[in-house]
């Protein structure tokens, strides 16, 4: 029996739930930890066979830790579930080591800037494994994609169609002839964690409206550009979505467009939600894919049409966690207790940007009950700098403790900033009892290097 058997486990994954129970004293849920997480007899947490308190001691805090086995397992799961037609959405978390893991699993990489593109290429991605996104791609980004012969350019505006025509007319490209493109459409389905609506999606900076006929006009304009072929349609209805029926709706809305233009691919984008809190349960990638494939059959999508997806968060979120060190504990009688850590909104802006909730725990006492109600805050110069607004922590919490937040593998490192000139944390991959620095800690010299 694994040593972590005493952690609560989810009862059933199923359709998912977005109604977290009110924070309670319960220990951290096992389902929020990476696949290889183990808790020893003393309650100490190891991931990938590496003790997290020791790791924090060795490399300092804050730090991002990723479970390599977990990353590989989610990439494989997605590839199996979608018959090999998956691009990893690199915006969720990208460095060369992550790109390599998804490439080794056979995935393509969805990139949406010159920086993401260059990172993917530096990790060994060739054109046929790349998909270029972006609602305002520069000439340089388009020219580079054409030169590399990327598998797909996901066209997002009439201006971009004009730019593509001019670039190809002036001899750019040649990497792939013809260059396959997709049109990004707004399907009129917009999903949030709790609900989806059928009209809201029209008000978007992304893509062409299906309902207004703009998407059909884009297809017609693309057909007039020599050297380009329209291969498919793409939509992305939102992120952190628990409701699988929203995706079914998306497939149903896109299917007639696929038939009308005799396309070979329908890409549903990303968006599958993950559990961040003890009380949350999310569908698995396999469940997501099964629903989508069933929806495609129900919508009469022809056999030969590929159903493809671009998951980001569901691949990486739960593989990662952040370790901080507690620097101050302020008890304000009758108000609350503030626990300040050595990072904050610069390494995880999600609580501030979206009001996102996280759990907090002590890797030295992973299975401990958490009776202490506290607000975990960062070291930045504003009151909004909250890491966990309503945290529960063990009663013996003390200054100097390593405090961790689980499920920070997506949109944490990738959205990190240097606010207050705070250097960004390193990224460590752990596997088979060893840790590897895949992104080193930023230094103050790194920050000053940009200035003459
Ligand atoms: N494909 C496209 C075109 C996208 O725009 C996105 C995410 C994805 C795929 C991947 O979606 P995912 O599977 O990760 O949900 N910063 C926000 C999330 C923004 C998502 C943007 N687009 C957050 O931290 O929640």
Image (tube, rainbow, N blue to C red):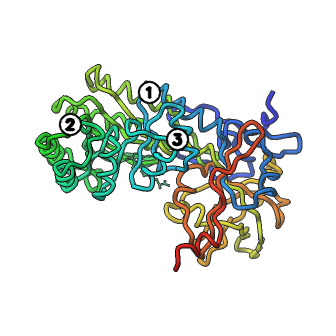
Of circles 3 and 2, the one toward us is 2
Residue 120 vertical placement versus 63 (above, below): above
User: What residue would you read off at disc 1?
Assistant: 84
User: What residue would you read off at disc 2?
Assistant: 229
**Label located before the other in sequence (2 or 1):** 1
User: What residue would you read off at disc 3?
Assistant: 314
Residue 390 seen = no
Mark 1, secondary structure of its residue: loop
Q: Mark 2 Cα within 10 Å, few/some/many (few <14, many 20+)?
A: some
**Label located before the other in sequence (3 or 2):** 2
Residue under the point 17% across and 33% down: 261
Q: CA distance from mark 3 to mark 2?
A: 31 Å
Residue under the point 39% across and 30% down: 292
Q: CA distance from mark 1 to mark 3?
A: 16 Å
Residue 295 seen = yes
Residue 449 vertical placement versus 299 (above, below): below
Q: Looking at the picture, how far across and down is residue 105, in whole percent?
A: 53, 31
Ligand 1 under 8 Å from disc 3 Cβ: yes
Mark 3, secondary structure of its residue: helix
Q: Is residue 258 left or right of residue 276?
A: left
């Amino acid at each position: 029996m694994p040593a972590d058997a005493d952690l609560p486990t989810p009862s059933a994954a199923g359709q998912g739930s977005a109604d977290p129970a009110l924070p309670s004293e319960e220990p951290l849920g096992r389902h929020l930890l990476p696949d290889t997480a183990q808790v020893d007899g003393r309650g100490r947490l190891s991931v990938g066979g590496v003790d997290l308190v020791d790791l924090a001691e060795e490399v300092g805090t804050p730090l991002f830790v990723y479970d390599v086995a977990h990353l590989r397992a989610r990439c494989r799961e997605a590839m199996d579930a979608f018959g090999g037609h998956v691009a990893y959405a690199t915006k969720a978390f990208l460095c060369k080591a992550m790109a390599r893991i998804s490439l080794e699993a056979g995935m393509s990489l969805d990139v949406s800037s010159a920086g993401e593109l260059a990172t993917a290429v530096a990790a060994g991605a060739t054109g046929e494994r790349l998909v270029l996104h972006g609602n305002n791609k520069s000439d340089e980004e388009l020219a580079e994609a054409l030169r590399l012969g990327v598998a797909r350019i996901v066209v997002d505006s009439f201006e971009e169609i004009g730019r593509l025509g001019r670039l190809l007319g002036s001899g750019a490209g040649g990497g792939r002839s013809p260059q396959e493109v997709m049109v990004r459409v707004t399907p009129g389905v917009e999903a949030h964690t709790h609900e989806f609506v059928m009209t809201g999606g029209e008000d978007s900076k992304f893509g062409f409206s299906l309902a207004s006929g703009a998407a059909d006009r884009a297809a017609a304009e693309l057909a007039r550009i020599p050297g380009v072929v329209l291969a498919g349609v793409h939509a992305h209805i939102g992120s952190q979505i628990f409701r699988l029926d929203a995706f079914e709706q998306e497939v149903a809305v896109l299917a007639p467009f696929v038939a009308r233009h005799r396309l070979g691919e329908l890409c549903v984008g990303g968006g599958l939600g993950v559990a961040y809190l003890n009380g949350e349960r999310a569908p698995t990638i396999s469940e997501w894919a099964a629903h989508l494939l069933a929806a495609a059959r129900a919508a009469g999508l022809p056999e030969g049409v590929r159903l493809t997806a671009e998951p980001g968060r569901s691949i990486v979120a739960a593989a990662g966690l952040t370790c901080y060190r507690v620097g101050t504990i302020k008890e304000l009688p009758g108000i609350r207790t503030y626990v300040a850590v050595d990072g904050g909104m610069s390494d995880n802006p999600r609580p501030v940007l979206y009001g996102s909730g996280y759990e907090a725990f002590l890797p030295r006492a992973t299975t401990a009950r958490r009776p202490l109600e506290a607000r975990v805050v960062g070291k930045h110069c504003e009151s909004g700098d909250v890491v966990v607004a309503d945290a529960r922590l063990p009663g013996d919490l003390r200054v100097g403790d390593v405090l961790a937040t689980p499920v920070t593998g997506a949109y944490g490192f990738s959205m990190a900033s240097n606010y207050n000139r705070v250097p960004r944390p390193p990224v460590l991959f752990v596997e088979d009892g060893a840790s590897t620095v895949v992104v080193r800690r930023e230094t103050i010299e790194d920050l000053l290097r940009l200035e003459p």
